[in-house]
Amino acid sequence: MQRFRRMKSLQKFAPLQASFHNHFCLERHLVDLQTFKLRRSAALAEWQLLAA
């Protein structure tokens, strides 16, 4: 929070960062490698659809 000069800019950034973090940070230590790779490819494919 110290990097944000205004609370309004923090409030704009926080929900976007949280959704991005939840989408891409899949807690690798809790799943096996095959499941992790499958979820990672699905997340990347969805991101490419959104970015296009």
Image (cartoon, helix red, strand yellow):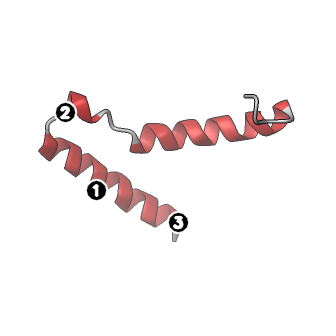
Q: CA distance from mark 2 to mark 3?
A: 27 Å
Among numbered discs 1 and 3, the one appearing first in the sequence: 1
Is label 2 or label 3 in front?
Answer: 2
Q: Determine which quarter of the picture holds residue 26.
A: top left
Image coords of residue 18 (percent x, y)? 55, 35
Among numbered discs 2 and 3, the one appearing first in the sequence: 2
Q: Are marks 1 and 3 in contact (CB under 8 Å)?
A: no
Image coords of residue 3 (percent x, y)? 75, 35
Image coords of residue 52 (percent x, y)? 51, 71
* Foreground of the two, 38 or 27: 27
Q: Which residue in the structure is indicated by mark 3?
A: 51
> Which of the labelled discs sits on residue 41, or is there none?
1
* Amino acid type, callout 3: Ala
Q: Residue furthest bottom?
A: 52
Q: The N terminus appears in which quarter of the rendering? A: top right
Q: Determine which quarter of the picture holds residue 7.
A: top right
Q: Which residue in the structure is indicated by mark 2?
A: 31
* Amino acid type, callout 2: Val
